[in-house]
Structure formats: structure tokens, C-alpha cells
Image (spheres, rainbow, N blue to C red):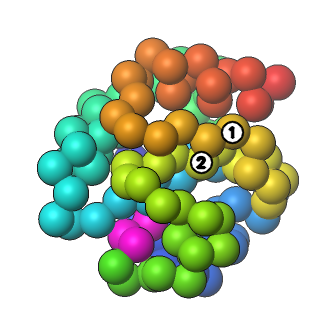
Amino acid sequence: MNVEHFDEQAFEAATASGVALVDFWATWCGPCKMQGAILDKMELPADLAGKVRVGKVDIDQVPALAVKFQVQTIPTIILFKDGQPIDRMVGVTRADVLVQKLEQAAL
């Protein structure tokens, strides 16, 4: 899976329209590394490929986004649709759960 790394500007562009899954993480966070490996290996169904974006925000590099979306625990994954957060998962989340949420959001 092609997981993008977002700075503030790239984040705004990626989440402005359509469906985007964003992992808020930090390099020093053990569970974040586990979540990162899950995202890297996650396979999207063919009907979702090209329709959704998956990315990461390092909260140490872009703290303003963590504050804006009230990320207090990492990893936190927020699902966006047309610029608005529609779902939030805190802690390590399995790939099948993430794919299911992406499918529901992309309807």
C-alpha cells in the first residue's frame, strides 16, 4: 500500500475531498510502529484503489494538526470524507477493520 506522509499543506489537499484515512503517530511510539506496519501491508479491494488516500501525520513534526483534531493518544486514526472527520479509532486497529470503514465511507 502506498502510505503518504502528510505535512500541513499536503494534509489539507489530501482530505479536502473524497475519502482519506490519516494515522496520527510519532517515531518514538511502539504501538504506532505496529500500526504503521499494518498500514504498509494493508491491501485495498480493487474498487477502492484510486478512490481513497491513506496517509500519516507525525505529531512531532506537525503538532498543529494533532491539536486541531484533539489527538491525545497515539496511534489515532481519523477517517475523513470531503474534509470532515467521520470516524476515529484510537490504538492499534486491524487492517480488516480499516478496510471495512473505508468501504463504508466510499459508498
Q: Is residue 46 at least partly visible in the picture? A: no
What residue sits 53% from the left and 61% below the top?
A: 71
Q: Quadrant of residue 94?
A: top left
- Does the magenta-highlighted stretch encompass residue 57? yes
Would you say 18 lies left or right of 66 here?
A: right
Q: What residue sits 47% from the left and 41% below the top? A: 90
Q: Which residue is mark 2?
A: 78
Name the element at disc 2.
Answer: strand
How far across and down, in percent of the image, does residue 41 sit? Answer: 28, 31
- Please state which of residues 8 and 90 is positioned toward the viewer in this rendering: 90
Dominant SS in magenta: strand
Mark 1 to mark 2 CA distance (whole Å): 6 Å
Looking at numbered disc 1 in the image, what kind of residue is underneath it? Asp
40 w.r.t. 4: above or below: above
Residue range highlighted in magenta = 55-59
Q: Position of residue 39 (x, y in %)?
A: 35, 38
Tell me where residue 25 appears, x and y as whole percent: 35, 59
Q: In the rendering, which numbered label is found on residue 87?
A: 1
